[in-house]
Amino acid sequence: MRGHRPLLAGTLILAAAAALAAGALPGAGAGASAAPAPDYRITVDPRRAGPEISDTMYGVFLEDINFAADGGLYAELVRNRSFEFGPRDHASYTPLTAWSEVARGDAEGRATVVDDAGRLNETNRQYLRLDLGSGTDPGTDPGAGFGVRNAGFFTGMEITAGDSYDFSVWARTDQPQGTELTVALDTAGGTPLAAELTRVVRGDSWTKYTGTLTATASASDGGLTVTAAGGGTVRLDMVSLFPQDTFRGRENGLRRDLAERIAALEPGFLRFPGGCLVNTGSHEAYAAPDWPRERSYQWKETVGPVEERAVNHNFWGYNQSYGLGYFEYFQFAEDVGAMPLPVVPALVTGCGENRATDDPELLARHIQDTLDLIEFANGPADSPWGSVRAEMGHPEPFGLTHLAVGNEENLPDEYFENFLAFRAAIEAEYPEITVIGNSGPSAGGTTFDRLWNLNREADVAMVDEHYYMAPNWFLSNNERYDSYDRSGPDVFLGEYASRDNRFANALAEAAYMTGLERNADVVRLASYAPLLAHTQGTQWRPDLIWFDNDASWGSASYEVQRLFAANTGDRVVPSRSTPTPGLDADLSGAVGLATWATSAAYDDVTVTSADGETLLTDDFSGGLDQWSPTTGAGTWSPVDGALVQADTTSTDNMLVAGDPAWRNYDLEVTATKRSGSEGFLIGFGVQGTGDYYWWNLGGWGNTRSAVEQAIGGAKSELVSDGTTIETGRAYDIRVEVRGREVTLFLDGEEWGSFTVPTPEPFRQVVTRDAETGELIIKVVNARDEAAVTAIDLGRRANVGRTAHVTTLQGDPDAVNGETERPIAPVESTFRGVDDRFTYTFPPHSVTFLRVPPR
C-alpha cells in the first residue's frame, strides 16, 4: 500500500543521542562533582529477589472497534463484498452501500440485490443480480459493459503502483454461451490503475473465479469495477480484492503495516474478539431467514470457508464481515508469538445493557459451543472441530491455555451463576484450561466489590479488570495492587487507558505500569485498550495505533507500551524511592449544583467553615446573583422558593458559587428530583470548568451513585454504591471537607468517604533480565522540572560502569501523527554508573537504564 511507513524495531536518533552522551541534555554529566543536590533518592537491593514477572505480562487486546478489523487489520479492500448491508444494521445502509452502477459504452442494465432461492448459501443470502440490457454486446462494442464499482472504505482503496492484488468473485449466468466479466482498478474519475482482467462466467451454478491485477499507477481514491457484457442475467456474490502483500503473505490475511506494528509490541498474549462485541445483542445463533442481526459474537459463525461466514451487526455501529474470524485470530497470535486468549459470552449483557438469559437450553448450547471452541483450538486433527481447523490449513493444535467468560457485566450475581456453569463444564473436560472471570466495567464500586467477593469465594484463578481513567487517577493509584490478597485470584488487567492520546496520558500510564510490575505476583497479564483506530471511523478515544487507508503510526502510549514490553525483565528487584515533596495539599474549591438529563429542584444551600463561619447561604428567594454557570446550559430559574433546572435533555450543566480558595467546609442542600432519567450532581472542590468533584446521585440512568473527580474534563470514580433516587422525594445532602478527607451524608446517614488522591509524578521500578544479568531501572518523571536523583544500588552491587539508556521525552501536550512523531525513543549511553551514582531524569520523561553486571 502506498506510503506505508517502514516499521523500526527501535528508533535511534543519533543527533539527540550524541547530545545526551556529550552532556547537552538532562542526564548527561550525572555523577559529576558539580551536580546539584538530588531531588529524589532511589534505593535498590539487588541481592533480594522480588516477584517473578510473567513471560506474558504485556499483551494486546484486539476488538473490531474504530474499524479495527474490517477496513483496518483485515486486508480486504472491498466493503460490503457480499451485499448483506441493510438498514437493520445502520440507518444509512443499503444492500448497495459502497457500490455504484457503472455503464461503459452504450451499455444499459439494472443492478438489484436479491434474496431468493438462487442465493450462494443459507448464511450468505443476498447477492447482486445484473440484468443486462441493450448496448452490452461485446461483438458490437468491445469496451461496452454494465456493472458496479466498489469504492472501498472511506475515501477509497489505497492502490500502490507495482503491487499485485488478488481478485475473486462467485458468479453464475443464465447465458448458455457464458458471460464475459471485465475487472478493473480505477480512480473515482475513471482513470485506469491496472491492466483490465477478463473472465468468462459459464453455467448457472455458483462458481468462484479468480485473477490478479498488478497496479501500474498509485491512487488514494481507487476502486474495483466489475462489468458484464452480453445479454441475460449474471449473478455476483463475495466480490473480493486482496493485496498480495499481507502479513506473512497469508491468504485472507492481515494488512502488513498494522500487523507489524502490533508484532513490534512483542505481545505476550492476544485477547480477542472483545469487548462489547462478545456479550451484547442477541445470543441466538444465526437462523435464516429472520435471524437476529444484532447478535453477540459467536465463534462458530466465523470459521470455515469465508463465503459461508454470516455477517453481523457490529455493536460499534457498522457491519463486520467475520473474514477476520477465530481461525485468523489464533493464527495471528501464533505468528507474533502471543498466547491466544479468547473471550466468550456469559449470556449476561454488558456495555450499557443489563439482561440475563433465562433460557437453560440457550445457556447449555453456549457452554457446549465453548467446549467445542477448545476442541477447535487444541483437539486432534481427526476430532470433529479439530478437523475444521485442519481443513483450514492448521492440523497442529494452537495450544490454548486461557479462556475468559464474559465482559463487563453489570449484573454480578446473574453473571457469576452462569460463569460457574461454564467453568464446571470446562474443568470437567479440560482441567488444564485457566478459566478467567471478571469484575465488571469499572475500577471500583458495588458491582466491582460484589464480583471480586464472588470470585474469591469460588477460588477463581484469574479476574479480568477494566477501567478507563483520567491521568491523575493513574498517577494517584500506583499502589492499587500493593494491598491485594496474594493468596487470592491473579489479576488480568484486560482493558485500561488514560483518556486521551497526549504524551501526558502516556506518562501517567507509564507511571502506573511501574506499579503493575512491582505487583507482578498479582498482576499477571495487562493490555491497553483499544488497540486500533481508523482516523475516519473512530468510536472511541484513546487508542494505541492510529491509521488511515494509507499509513499507520503509534501514539505516545504505543511508544510507552513497546518500551515496557522490550524492557520487562524476568524478576522485580526490590527498590524504593522518596516522594515528591509538597503534594499533600488540602482539597479546596467552590461549590456547585448540576443535573444530567433530569429536572431537579435545589433549596436551602449553606456552606459553613469548620470553625462555624457562614460562607454562603441561599434560599433562592432573591434570585441567582450568587451563582454562575461553568458547564453546559440548562434552564435554571427560581421557582416557588427553590432553584429549578427544568430541561430534562440538558446534560453536564453546573451552576457554581463561592470561592475556589475555600477549604475545610460543610456544604448542605436539599434536593428533589422532578422528572428525567437520573438524579442530582452536587459539586465541591470546584476550581473551574473541567476541574471539580461532584457527588453523582442516581447517575448512569439512575442505576448507581458515585463521587467523580474531573481534571481537564476527564472524570474518574473515587467511591460508589448502588444508591438510586426517587422522583418527588426531598433529600438532605451534606458534604464535609476536612483537609484531604471528604465525608458524604444522605438524609443524615453516612453514605461514604474518601481521601483526595495524590498524583505522584515520580515513579520507578527495577527489574532484572535473567539472560543478560542486567538491572533495568525504569523511571517516570511527569514533572515540569528535571529530577536529579541519587541512585543507591547497594554495597558491592557488582555492576558495570556503562548503562544503555532509552528515553522518551517531550511536551506533555504532544500527540504523534502520520507525518510528525514528536514522541519517539532516544537511545544513548551513560558512563557514570557505580554502586551509588546520580542521574538527572528529564522533565516529562520515561527512562530505561539497562545496567549490565561487571
Image: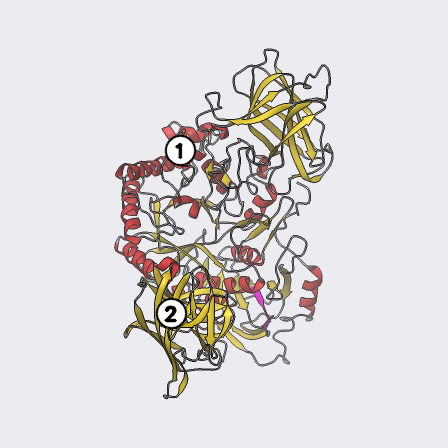
10 Å crowding of disc 1: few (<14), some (14-19), many (20+): few
Region of the chain picked out in magenta, as a range: 840-848
User: Which mark is first along the chain, 1 or 2?
Assistant: 1
Please tell me whether mark 2 sits on a helix, a strand or a loop. strand
Q: Position of residue 582 (x, y in %)?
A: 49, 80
Of 74 and 203, nearer the camera is 203
Viewer-closest of 67 and 334 = 67
Q: How many marks?
A: 2
Residue hosting label 1: 291
Q: Tell me the quarter of the picture where residue 467 sits.
A: bottom left
Q: Is residue 562 visible?
A: yes
User: Magenta-highlighted stretch: main secondary structure?
Assistant: strand
Crowd class of label 2 (few under 14; some 14 to 19; many from 20; radius 10 Å): many
* Residue tagged 2: 601
Quarter-wise, where is residue 105 in the image? top right
Residue 853 visible in the shown view? no
In the picture shown, does residue 573 fall above or below 411? Answer: below
The residue lying toward the viewer, choosing from 180 and 555, is: 180
Three-letter amino acid code of the residue under disc 2: Ala
Q: Is residue 194 above or below residue 201?
A: below
Q: SS of the residue at dot 1?
A: loop
User: How far from the left and from the top, in percent, is residue 403?
Assistant: 38, 45
Amino acid type at mark 1: Trp
Residue 755's place in the image compared with 414, above or below, is below
Label 2 to label 1, Cα distance in Å? Answer: 47 Å
